[in-house]
Image: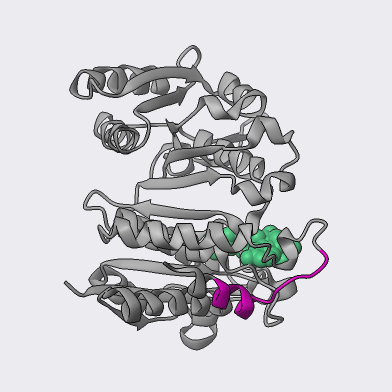
Amino acid sequence: MTHKILLLAGDGIGPEIVSATETVLTALVERFGFKCEFERALMGGCAIDAHGDSLPEATLALARAADAILLGAVGGPKWDKVERAIRPERGLLRLRAELDLFCNLRPAALFPALADASTLKPEVVSGLDLMIIRELTSGIYFGQPRGIEVLADGVRRGFNTLEYRDHEIERIARQGFEIARKRSGRLCSVDKSNVLEVTELWREIVQGLAGEYPDVELEHLYVDNAAMQLVRAPKQFDVIVTTNMFGDILSDLAAMLTGSIGMLPSASLNGQGKGLFEPVHGSAPDIAGMELANPLATILSAAMMLRYTLAEADLADKVERAVARVLADGARTADIAGTASSTVSTGEMTKAVVAALD
Ligand code: NAD
């Protein structure tokens, strides 16, 4: 079967890191019989420049037709002043909403060769490999009513609504159980059910599903304790499933345990397993076009695409092993150089990964 992959290079370093990843995927085609065809479309600031909209209809149509979407990054100072409704970030939010990408996977794995990059002690983080699953299309970031109003007495009141419907909780919880089942069989659901009724419902529904997954060991933690435990002893976790806002915060915290933003991939999936895959970092306008960008977060995002959407787990393993190998051999882009005496460019790192594919 030929997989249709839509490439959205975006802005800043986006074109460099997506092109690097295309090179790796093309090597899989040439050497291991991977079948795919690439489409390309504009999204973000480049789409505003060309079409006056960060997510043009043509891009959305291609995204709907694709099996999987690989995104570089969007945004940059050039578009910071454009009308809010068409800003690059809005295009990304719209794309997630239009494709109903409710399940955000944010792995935080520490490559042994980069143990020194973390601010935590090596013995606390070495071997760390956890997956945070964040609900992405509901919760307090989307709840209505929301706003800032002036009350009769002149006092201003800001308000947002945290709400979850039972089916929204159930579908993200199921993803948690399914993914835990494919990993070590441990799932931690994070809520604040001692204070928030919404997450009381969350806990009740997650608990209710546990009987269907007897092979998964389920625990519940309050979000404040989860934050503490992630810093104290992160290796106790394997898979964490949580709400949109808690996941936003905890996934950034977990990401930093690994030390480098240039290494972190992510996936956003819908109910049919279709997904948008992108590095966690932004468009890094400060280094755009300088061959300094670390392409590994995007290459690892493509590995997630192979694993979670295209059912090509063997190829995903190959890409992840190749990345581990080049790091073990000492290749470092500037962002992960630490005390290394020399660094490689975006192109050199990409070449090394291609050469290390077994
Ligand atoms: P950023 O992640 O782009 O950059 C933060 C720092 O990390 C910079 O010093 C940058 O050079 C460095 N960095 C990031 N990725 C790197 C890589 N692959 N290799 C080497 N160094 C890397 O965050 P920012 O500066 O806050 O944002 C820049 C722009 O990106 C903004 O317009 C922001 O809105 C946008 N942004 C987009 C996304 C997205 O597309 N999903 C996410 C975050 C930020």
Above/below status of 222 relative to 302:
above
Q: Quadrant of ligand 1?
A: bottom right
Residue 297 covered by magenta stretch: no
The image shows residue 50 at horizontal and vertical percentages of: 49, 88
Residue closest to the eye, 205 or 56? 205
Would you say 183 lies left or right of 195 here?
left
Residue closest to the eye, 345 or 328? 328
Would you say 244 lies left or right of 331 here?
left
The image shows residue 137 at horizontal and vertical percentages of: 38, 46
Residue 120 falls in which quadrant of the image? Answer: top right
Residue 208 falls in which quadrant of the image? Answer: top left
In the image, farthest residue toward the bottom: 50
Magenta-highlighted residues: 341-352
Residue 346 covered by magenta stretch: yes
- Residue at x 79%, y 70% (from the top left corner): 342
Q: Quadrant of the N terminus?
A: bottom left
Tell me if residue 179 can be seen.
yes
The image shows residue 94 at horizontal and vertical percentages of: 40, 61
- Number of labelled discs? 0
Tell me if residue 154 can be seen.
no
The image shows residue 311 at horizontal and vertical percentages of: 25, 57
Above/below status of 311 relative to 122:
below
